[in-house]
């Protein structure tokens, strides 16, 4: 009992974060994470609940109290391996998961005070394991990998959903081949999420580890063009589609094709995947301009705004049609963006991009107001009459979400698509086609890394049961 | 010996600053259809550049591209030697040409390296049984590519140069208008070349209400519909050149948009090229 009491007395530990004025000078990581001491202190706050709620809040179903207990015992490697049992990417998830609406939201301690900092501990353990077991020997041994069973599974797209699926299935003895359209593996982890939130070296190492386990990676391969879904169905015993929500949405308003107007996808892909922030060392350019307006309120909008700050923009404004309360972005990221000098303009929306000689000069906007609440609980907004105003800017970044990429979908007969344009699946990721499964953003629309990991895992188990006709317990 | 995808097996400067390159790519050679393109990277630090395939040989497993030196990436690409390997090569991208039976003649207007885009489309139309007239234009006589090949499969060929060094002195636009006025039945026009030329061709054929297809070139990154950088105004909406195109109804294209968007990175391209040339000089 005394331990519980002692645990509660310790305040939630806060990871070391680089100073804003320093971090906007480069693309290096913002948060430095926990020190060993902080990790141990934080672990001691955990109540070790008999019926832990945190696990229910985790899409990857990590045994959270178990790994925290191992930290308190100083058994860091075992703690890291405990996470790896259910999540192949602790270094990634410890950095980009919205823990505040998942595991940490359900934390019992959080009812009376600050919840346990589960995410920061996960990151610490992921990093610790990567360093202490850099060759993956201990991890490989702990994974209990079955011998090859001769069955082959293809995964299309190399983002989190496919990586998680591959991890689960390779352990069960399947031969996995991952096909990627781009020249690098990792999907949104490499083209979308900026270096300052998720260093690309981490993604590379995770891919290398899966390769060591026997997963085959093929780059530069657009399925639907160079090979059809039917080709894959002939060559493999099962196919998983982890395509992501790959096509950016635009407002479809006047002036959107002016020079200086980007989709967030393009802006971030240039900077992250193509390393345009290192131009001219790298060949892909990006417009470095003074005044940047980002349109949207999600994590992608924040990533774009903070990227613009690092590309030396003097004035970066996020224009969002609702208020800070409704922003889908993580609170932590909003704080980081504010610290770095990003301005916010709420209850406003663009109606026209205005240019001179083909270049964006200003955006005509209108003010918005709340008037109703939708069935999903989301507040509805409408424009206020005669409220037009202008914002001068050189670059505008449209970050209002994505829809499904149609290349493979259009060329695959019999694959049922839902009203929103995404692939229709049951709870286990099964599509309308025999032996074809799907998961991640291509079934749900834009969501999070951890939800994609969860979907990949569920589909892996469904494929296992489909191919072996025995339910995994 | 099995060569990997992306190995350059032949390179030759076929016209001043225009290079013919044959690249090993078994699966792409087998799949690619007229009108489609590839995306390649020279090095790990390179740009992803889209290029149309002029010829493909499914048996040999090769594709042929024509590259005009313009910016750093095309210089670096054409400086690569036989036997070296591209960092990345993927394709086919984009939609294949829609080949249909045309009453009267199909007129192909080819400007500069746009000719490489037209060649497979010409061939496909020939196989379909259409009657073909090719109008080929260049600044001067040295700058033609694929002239013999196109002459061989066309029913009629009209050559013009800006300086009159060969063929008629004038532009493809003048030739096309004369051709239409002469009373020859033009059922369809297909055009590939500099955007300004395509715009002018579209204006002429609109006047005579002749259905016209333009093969567009745009700045793109992934080439699979993910970035939206290649978007172009089509009627009142936007389409992506990479996956909705590259061929569009030329009368619906917002040519103003397209022309301007080509120039977005003019400044950066200059920096990049100067830096590259400086480096090359240092090696010499």
Image: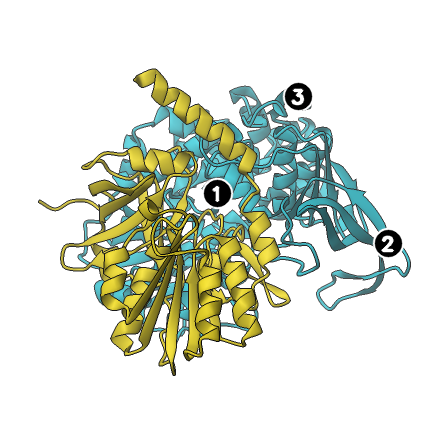
Chain colours: A cyan, B yellow
In this orientation, which residue lies closer to the viewer: B37 or A460? Answer: B37
Give the Cα separation between the discs numbered 1 and 3.
26 Å
Q: Are marks 1 and 2 on the same chain?
A: yes
Q: Is tag 3's residue or tag 2's residue first in the polypeptide sequence?
A: 3
Residue A30 in view, yes or no? yes
In this orientation, which residue lies closer to the viewer: A119 or B123? Answer: B123
Query: Position of A13 compared to B274: left or right?
Result: right
Q: Are marks 1 and 3 on the same chain?
A: yes
Residue A427 in view, yes or no? no
Q: Which residue is mark 1?
A: A191
Q: Which residue is mark 2?
A: A388
Q: Residues within 10 Å of mark 3 (few under 14, many from 20)?
A: few
Going by the picture, which residue comes out furthest to the left?
B1
Discs 1, 3 touching: Cβ within 8 Å = no
**Image location of residue A219, percent across then percent down:** 32, 47
**Chain ID for label 1?**
A
Q: Residues within 10 Å of mark 2 (few under 14, many from 20)?
A: some
Q: Which mark is residue B1?
A: none
Question: Which residue is pictured at 89% across the width and 55% down the height?
Answer: A387
Query: Position of A286 compared to B242: left or right?
Result: right
Going by the picture, which residue comes out furthest to the right?
A386
Q: Is tag 1's residue or tag 3's residue first in the polypeptide sequence?
A: 3
Looking at the image, is mark 3 or mark 2 nearer the viewer? 2
SS of the residue under disc 1: helix
Q: Which residue is mark 3?
A: A19
């Amino acid at each position: 009992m005394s331990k519980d009491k002692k645990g509660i007395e310790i305040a939630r530990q806060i990871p070391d974060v680089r100073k804003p004025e320093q971090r906007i000078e480069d693309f290096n990581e913002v948060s430095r994470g926990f020190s060993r001491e902080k990790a141990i202190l934080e672990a001691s706050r955990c109540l070790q609940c008999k019926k832990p709620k945190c696990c229910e809040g985790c899409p990857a179903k990590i045994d959270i109290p178990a790994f925290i207990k191992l930290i308190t015992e100083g058994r860091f490697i075992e703690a890291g391996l405990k996470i790896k049992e259910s999540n192949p990417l602790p270094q990634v998830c410890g950095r980009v998961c919205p823990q505040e609406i998942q595991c940490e939201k359900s934390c019992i301690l959080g009812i009376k005070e600050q919840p346990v900092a589960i995410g920061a501990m996960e990151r610490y353990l992921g990093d610790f394991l990567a360093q202490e077991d850099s060759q993956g020997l201990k991890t490989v041994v702990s994974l209990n990998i079955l011998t090859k069973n001769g069955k082959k599974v293809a995964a299309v797209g190399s983002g989190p959903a496919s990586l998680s699926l591959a991890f689960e299935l390779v352990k069960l003895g399947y031969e996995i081949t991952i096909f990627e359209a781009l020249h690098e593996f990792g999907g949104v982890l490499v083209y979308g999420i900026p270096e300052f939130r998720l260093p690309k070296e981490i993604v590379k190492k995770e891919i290398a580890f899966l390769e060591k386990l026997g997963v085959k990676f093929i780059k530069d391969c657009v399925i639907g063009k160079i090979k059809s879904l039917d080709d894959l169905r002939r060559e493999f015993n099962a196919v998983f589609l982890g395509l992501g929500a790959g096509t950016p949405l635009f407002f479809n308003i006047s002036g959107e094709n002016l020079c200086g107007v980007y989709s967030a996808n393009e802006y971030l892909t240039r900077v992250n995947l193509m390393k345009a922030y290192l131009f001219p060392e790298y060949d892909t350019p990006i417009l470095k301009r003074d005044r940047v307006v980002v349109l949207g309120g999600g994590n992608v909008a924040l990533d774009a705004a903070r990227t613009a700050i690092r590309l030396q923009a003097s004035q970066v404004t996020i224009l969002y049609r609702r208020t800070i309360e409704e922003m889908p972005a993580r609170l932590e990221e909003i704080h980081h963006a504010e610290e770095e000098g990003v301005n916010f303009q709420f209850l406003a929306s663009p109606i026209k991009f205005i240019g001179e000689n083909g270049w964006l000069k200003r955006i005509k906007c209108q003010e918005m107001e709340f008037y109703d609440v939708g069935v999903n609980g989301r507040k509805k907004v409408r424009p206020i009459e005669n409220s037009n105003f202008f914002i001068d800017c050189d670059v505008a970044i449209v970050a209002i979400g994505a829809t499904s990429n149609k290349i493979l979908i259009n060329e695959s007969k019999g694959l049922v698509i839902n009203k929103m344009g995404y692939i229709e699946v049951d709870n286990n990721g099964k599509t309308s086609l025999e032996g074809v499964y799907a998961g991640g953003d291509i079934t749900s629309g834009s969501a999070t890394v951890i939800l994609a990991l969860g979907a990949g895992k569920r589909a892996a188990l469904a494929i296992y049961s489909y191919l072996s006709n025995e339910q995994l317990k | 010996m099995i060569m990997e995808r992306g190995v350059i097996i032949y390179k030759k400067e076929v016209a001043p600053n225009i290079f013919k390159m044959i690249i090993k790519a078994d699966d792409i050679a087998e799949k690619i259809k007229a009108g489609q393109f590839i995306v390649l990277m020279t090095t790990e630090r390179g740009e992803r550049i889209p290029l149309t395939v002029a010829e493909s040989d499914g048996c040999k497993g090769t594709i042929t591209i024509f590259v005009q030196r313009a910016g750093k990436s095309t210089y670096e690409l054409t400086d690569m030697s036989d036997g070296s390997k591209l960092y990345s090569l993927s394709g086919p991208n984009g939609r294949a040409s829609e080949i249909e039976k045309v009453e009267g003649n199909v007129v192909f207007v080819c400007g500069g390296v746009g000719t490489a885009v037209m060649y497979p489309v010409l061939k496909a139309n020939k196989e379909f049984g259409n009657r073909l007239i090719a109008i080929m234009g260049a600044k001067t006589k040295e700058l033609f590519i694929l002239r013999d090949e196109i002459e061989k499969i066309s029913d009629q060929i009209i050559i013009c140069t800006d300086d009159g060094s060969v063929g008629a002195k004038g532009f493809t636009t003048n030739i096309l208008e004369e051709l239409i006025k002469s009373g020859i039945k033009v059922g369809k026009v297909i055009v590939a070349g500099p955007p300004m030329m395509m715009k002018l061709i579209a204006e002429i054929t609109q006047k005579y209400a002749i259905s016209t297809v333009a093969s567009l070139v745009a700045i793109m990154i992934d080439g699979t519909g993910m970035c939206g950088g290649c978007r172009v105004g089509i009627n009142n909406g936007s389409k992506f050149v990479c996956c909705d195109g590259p061929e569009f109804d030329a009368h619906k294209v917002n040519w103003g948009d397209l022309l301007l968007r080509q120039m977005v990175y003019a400044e950066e391209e200059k920096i990049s090229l100067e830096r590259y040339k400086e480096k090359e000089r240092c090696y010499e």
